Amino acid sequence: MKWVGIGLAIAITFCILFLILAPARFVVQRIDPNQQFLREATGTIWVGQVNTYHRTALLGHVAWQAKPASLLRGKIAYSLEYIGHGVSLEAETERGWSTLSVVLNGQIDPQAINLILSHYEMDITGSLEIQDLSISLTDDGVINLAEGEIHWAGGSVHYGLGSNVHQTRLPAMVGRFHKQNGGIQLTISEGERELMLMTAMYDPATGEIAISASNRLVVLADAPWLTKGEESDIAFTVYEKLFEPD
């Protein structure tokens, strides 16, 4: 029994030393073996950072630091920070036996937002602020929790409609996340009136997101001829496939 105890102590010590001293590139190479997105990792699994790329363009870097107290609760937790072009995010992550939880805060500037909106022939001014966006899910992809807010102070918007480019100014908006029918729904409301402007519903079972715009948003976008009914009614819904589920 004495030798069993000694062997167990050696094994535990080895595991702890591995977590503390193992090079960061050891994990990064397994996440992105071809170095398409993650390169130039430094530090250890315990504390380190890695640069993020799109093709040959440097986007920013991710830094992490382990939270050793979480090991006493049988979990592994990290503090993460991402700094990139127009993006500044901080996250607290915690991995349990079968669940993963993330709490996200930060800011996304227009230059980063418009890279996505350009696909829809749109651009905006003003930054998005993310406040306590909390998501928890199981290894099977079941969403246990989705809550938090995003805020936009309002500003000018350019968008294409047909062959024309329109410009308008939209009011401040608040987006609230919540769990809905096994997925995540984001409801965006007009800041002062609390009137629904848009919803975005993500369904993990299909990998699809459904985005619906209300008549109120269409009127604010200076296209009232597209509306019918009350201002809170849905004017149109578009669907986008994010990925093919397993």
Image (spheres, rainbow, N blue to C red):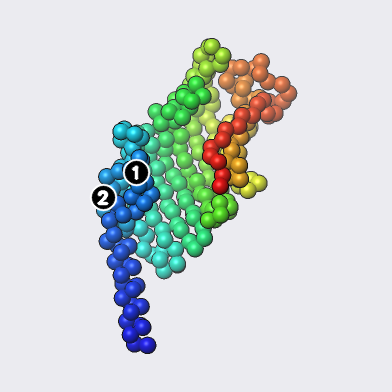
The CA distance from mark 2 to mark 1 is 17 Å
Residue drawn where x is 41% and y is 69% of the image: 72
Q: Is residue 72 left or right of residue 41?
A: right
Would you name the residue on which mark 1 appears? Answer: 34
- Asked whether the beta carbons under mark 2 and mark 1 sit within 8 Å of each other, the answer is no
Mark sitting on residue 139: none
Q: Looking at the image, is 38 positioned above or below residue 227?
A: below
The location of residue 237, given as percent across then percent down, is 64, 29
- The quadrant where residue 162 appears: top right
Give the residue at the far right of this rendering: 229
Which circle's residue, 2 or 1, is located before the other in the chain? 1
| Vertical comparison of 203 with 215: above or below | below
Crowding at mark 1 (Cα within 10 Å: few <14, some 14-19, many 20+): few
Residue closest to the eye, 193 or 227: 227
103 or 23, which is in the foreground?
23
Can residue 179 be seen by looking at this rendering? yes
Point 52% across, 15% down: residue: 166
The image shows residue 218 at horizontal and vertical percentages of 61, 22
Which image quarter: residue 188?
top right
Q: Nearer the viewer, residue 22 or 114?
A: 22
The local secondary structure at tag 1 comes to: loop
Q: Mark 2 points at which residue?
A: 42
Residue under the point 31% across and 54% down:
26
